[in-house]
Image (cartoon, grey):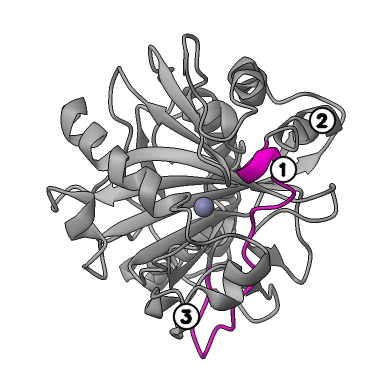
Amino acid sequence: MSSPWPGALAGLVLGVALCLAEQDWTYEGSNGPSQWSRLGYKECDHHQQSPIDIHSKSVQQKHLQPLELHFFDHAPLSANVTNNYVGALVALTSGHVPLVRAGSLYGEYSVVGFHFHWGENDTVGSEHHLDGHSYPLEMHILCQNTKYDSLTKATQRPDGLAVLAVWFEVGPSPNSGLMRLSPALDRIRAGGASTLLSEPPSLLELMPNDLGHFYRYEGSLTTPGCYEVVTWTIFKQPVQATEQQMARFRTLTGLRSRPIGHNYRLVQLPYGRQVFERRPLDEAALEMKPQRDGQEAAASGPQSSATAAVASLLLLQLAATLTTLSAAVALTL
Ligand SMILES: [Zn+2]
């Protein structure tokens, strides 16, 4: 079920380089995002880049499988948390490797690590936008296709990586996952600092209850080298966290001890790419249709229509209940 950690750890070393800083690029100034291509990261100028602004009116409804998330409810025994000058990266260093299956992805993916993007205040910060709106924080769970034996290979294949993205919004209640991370954030305020967190959160603590409703499109890493090998899953429902929890990320400092004011890339043009949406209740309704149109439809009197309607309603209710329950038991949606 789970792959051994040494492979994942080897990948993680590269993951740090991939998703966070190599110090020849930054988020502002002469080596900022508009210059990444000039610095040699040619793909940053290509036409399948991320992040994007998702237009809810133009997304296409699609029958996408539910995601199967394995070990997302297992808190790892420990985690390494690193400030590498442009962000905070969390690597799960022991316990089961969380896996992502189904979800209409290109196979099975193992979690390499996760990290966060934020802004100067609560009005900005997320990389992906929804109808022009940005959230104060966005988490990326980086996953590698298990059919490739290294992250390097995965970054060279169009089906190599999958990223699960979670938006955070300000709310009255603290998020329990961020609470568990906060002691580590306090210890890695200085650029280059790294610490071992003894009671890390499970991934599920950092994710929304509704994992069945998500957007899907093909894009890239949002940092150099901007490899166009990422299948993106962006959960529609944001996670709530307090203003204080958002602000804690802004205490981190980067180069020359300057605060990491923001670490999000501006949205990129879609260049004709389609964004798909999975809505679990719509799917339940669609699944009813073959039954009503099938051989049972031959007996389509008023009574059977009423029976089908009741069955449809029950299925919809069941789907809603399962969606809620799945957040608690955490595994298959
Ligand atoms: Zn990211």
Secondary element type, mark 1? loop
Q: How far is the residue under mark 3 from the one under mark 1?
A: 25 Å
The first of marks 3 and 1 along the sequence is 3
Mark 2 residue type: Thr
Occupied quadrant, residue 244: top right
The residue range painted magenta reads 253-276
Residue 120 is at least partly visible in this image = yes
Occupied quadrant, residue 5: top left
Residue at x 50%, y 63% (from the top left corner): 222
Q: Which is in the foreground here, disc 3 or disc 2?
A: 3
Residue 250 located left or right of residue 31:
right
SS assignment for the magenta stretch, majority: loop
Secondary element type, mark 3? loop
Marks 3 and 1 in Cβ contact (< 8 Å): no
The first of marks 1 and 2 along the sequence is 2
* Residue 122 sits inside the magenta stretch: no
Residue nearest the viewer, comparing 228 with 240: 228
Residue nearest the viewer, comparing 135 with 12: 12
Which quadrant of the figure contains the N terminus? Answer: top left
Secondary element type, mark 2? loop
Q: Which residue is mark 1?
A: 258
